[in-house]
Image (cartoon, rainbow, N blue to C red):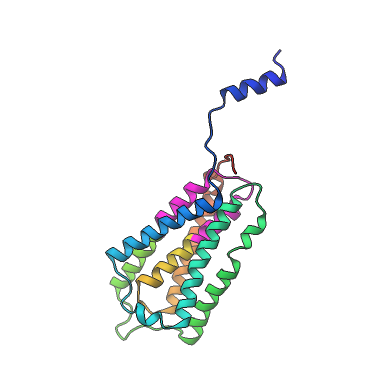
Amino acid sequence: MITTSELIEALVADAPPVRRLRPPVVRAALWLLLAVLIFGLLAAGHGVRPDLAQRLDQPAFIVGTAAALLTSVLAAVASFMLNLPDRSRGWALLPVPALLAWVGTVGYGCLVNWVGIGPDGVQLGETARCFATALITSLPLSLAMFAMLRRGALLSASTVSLTGSLAVAAMSATAMSLFHSLDATVMILIWNLGIATLIVALGRLLASRLVVPAPYE
């Protein structure tokens, strides 16, 4: 009869080598590098919004865009931190201050300018371009995020998925702010929340299927 020590030695001898995960900050930086690349492609192919210089003179626009970008960065870091079983669950709170600031600026815009649409209304072409920008930004970032998270810990799959989804949604909102001049605050709010809800719903649905354990540092 095989002994316990012999069984352990046999299992260890037959175990395939496993590549360790990179540190969370490094993985977050790689994901953000992909976002920078996507923004560069959008700028080259689409160009920034024509009134960007004027909007940069508006404090609300600067704070809102910066808060959305910061929310994405912090949510990405939190997601990769929570992806490791030895990290505190408190990392989930990391993006909350930036998220509140982002939502607060959008809410302020809703109060001061309920909806601002030109005399010709919202043009179908601009709406289609907005949708294309959101899709081009969110789809590759979502795929990259979940590909990078799937080898992590299963202990907080839903929390990891939610923070990762928040990172993608905030980055998509940042792209829309920089590349589109559609001035309809309520519509942009609904659009952003719709993207976030869809990504979060998909993330929660796929979390338990995508995430598989792996060694960590």
**Residue 171, x across and y down, in percent:** 45, 64
In the rendered view, tell whether residue 197 sits above or below residue 67: above
Magenta stretch encompasses residue 155: yes
Magenta stretch encompasses residue 11: no
Residue at the spot 48% in from the left edge and 75% down from the top edge: 64
**Residue 211, x across and y down, in percent:** 55, 45
Q: Nearer the viewer, residue 146 or 199?
A: 146
Q: Quadrant of the C terminus?
A: top right
Q: Quadrant of the N terminus?
A: top right
97 left or right, relative to 61 = right
Is residue 136 among the parts visible in the rendering?
no
**Residue 196, x across and y down, in percent:** 49, 63
Q: Nearer the viewer, residue 168 or 205?
A: 168
Q: Which residues are magenta?
A: 138-167
Quarter-wise, where is residue 11 in the image?
A: top right
Quarter-wise, where is residue 49 in the image?
A: bottom left
User: Magenta region's main secondary structure?
Assistant: helix
Is residue 9 among the parts visible in the rendering?
yes
